[in-house]
Image (cartoon, rainbow, N blue to C red):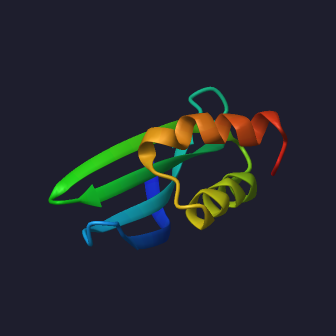
């Protein structure tokens, strides 16, 4: 069973004065083999009544590591469309 909890949220005013809201969530799933939790990130973007979502499951068994990645994404106002590539870079470069 997947659990999800909100870590951070941003409201950004775009150049045309529209408001974009971003929510950064941590997801928790359980491995069927070991029942050990593993964590991922879900970003939701709300703009003009529409919602865009991207999720990466199974980033790490370390909640602290995934929270640190989410904090970097939040600080840099990362949107769902670019999240996968940026998380891949962060993990590859061992930035967290």
Q: Which of 10 and 4 is in front in this view?
A: 10
Say above or below: 59 vs 49.
Answer: above
Say above or below: 67 vs 36.
Answer: below
Q: Nearer the viewer, residue 24 or 39?
A: 24
Residue 13: image quadrant is bottom left
Where residue 66 sits: x, y (%)?
A: 67, 52
The residue lying at 15 percent from left, 59 percent from top is: 49
Q: Can residue 84 be seen in this view?
A: yes
Say above or below: 18 vs 46.
Answer: below
Where residue 84 sits: x, y (%)?
A: 55, 36
Q: Nearer the viewer, residue 64 or 55?
A: 55
Where residue 50 sits: x, y (%)?
A: 18, 53
From the viewer's perspective, tell me whether residue 64 is left or right of residue 9. Answer: right
Where residue 87 sits: x, y (%)?
A: 64, 41
The residue lying at 67 percent from left, 34 percent from top is: 88
Q: Residue furthest top?
A: 33
Q: Which residue lies furthest to the front in this view?
A: 15
From the viewer's perspective, tell me whether residue 61 is left or right of residue 17. Answer: right
Q: Which of 9 and 66 is in front in this view?
A: 9
The residue lying at 45 percent from left, 70 percent from top is: 9
Q: Residue furthest right?
A: 94
């Amino acid at each position: 069973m997947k659990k999800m909890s909100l870590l951070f949220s941003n409201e950004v005013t775009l150049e045309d004065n529209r408001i974009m809201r971003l929510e950064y969530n941590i997801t928790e799933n359980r491995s069927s083999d070991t029942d050990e939790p593993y964590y991922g990130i879900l970003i939701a973007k709300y703009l003009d009544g529409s919602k865009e979502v991207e999720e990466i499951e199974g980033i790490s068994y370390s909640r602290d590591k995934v929270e640190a990645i989410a904090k970097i994404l939040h600080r840099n106002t990362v949107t769902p469309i670019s999240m996968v590539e940026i998380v891949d870079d962060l993990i590859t470069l061992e930035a967290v």
